Image (cartoon, helix red, strand yellow):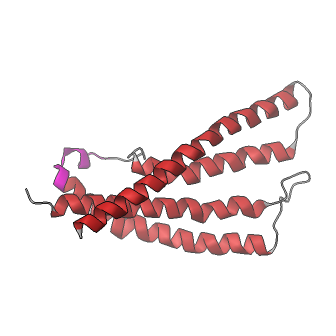
Amino acid sequence: MIRFAKTLSAIIDHVNEFTGRAVAWLTAALVLVVTADVFSRYCLNRSVVAIQEVEWHLFSAIFLIGAGFTLKHNRHVRVDVFYSRLTPRGQALINVFGCLVFLVPFCAIVVWAGSEFAYNSFSYRETSPDPGGLPARYVIKAIIPVGFLLVLLQGVSCACSSAVLLLKRE
């Protein structure tokens, strides 16, 4: 049981580490797109709707796909007035409870609803409602369930790692 939990946690951690590092490169692309947008808007007096949409698509992808990586590195914002004062075993107990009761079910609901949302968008070949906007709005909508699936998996990893800590003999 402990070996399985450690192996599962290691695999999920590896997936989110790889994914997080890969998606981090999108920040460089976002900087370039924003720079091009600012240049065209203020130097050429021309605004392109598609460039503005690419900006928020990139930001959304970075945020959603990077959320699992952020959870893996324990960098999410939280108020840990009591948590930080607990022993490692106390923290592990809260992690197992929080992940299994709150995080994983919430993410599962968003993955399920987001998949349906993305599927509907894909089936209609949804495009931007703005003139000159991007032609494939369903691509960014498909990133919603993917991002939450990565967070769900990282929640399982966190629960497994914490359970291992709880099950270890002193």
Q: Is residue 83 visible?
A: yes
**Residue extending furthest top?**
43
Range of the magenta residues?
A: 80-89
Instruction: Indicate the position of residue 24 as horizontal and vertical percent values.
Output: 58, 41
Judge from the rendering whether residue 151 lies leftward or rightward of residue 81; answer left or right. Answer: right
Q: Residue at x 42, y 59 (%)?
A: 12
The quadrant of the rendering that contains the C terminus is: bottom left
Instruction: Indicate the position of residue 40 as horizontal and vertical percent values.
Output: 87, 31
Q: Residue at x 65, y 42 (%)?
A: 26
Judge from the rendering whether residue 104 lies leftward or rightward of residue 111; answer left or right. Answer: left
Judge from the rendering whether residue 14 lies leftward or rightward of residue 64; answer left or right. Answer: left
Total labels drawn:
0
Q: Residue at x 85, y 26 (%)?
A: 42
Q: Is residue 93 visible?
A: no
Judge from the rendering whether residue 170 lies leftward or rightward of residue 125; answer left or right. Answer: left
Q: Would residue 82 be counted in the magenta stretch?
A: yes
Q: Nearer the viewer, residue 62 or 7?
A: 7
Q: Would residue 114 be counted in the magenta stretch?
A: no
Instruction: Indicate the position of residue 148 as horizontal and vertical percent values.
Output: 53, 62
Q: Residue at x 80, y 32 (%)?
A: 36
Above-or-below relation of 99 to 117: above
Q: Quadrant of residue 84?
A: top left
The quadrant of the rendering that contains the N terminus is: bottom left
Q: Quadrant of residue 6?
A: bottom left
Instruction: Indicate the position of residue 35 as horizontal and vertical percent values.
Output: 76, 30
Q: Nearer the viewer, residue 55 or 80?
A: 55
Above-or-below relation of 71 to 118: above
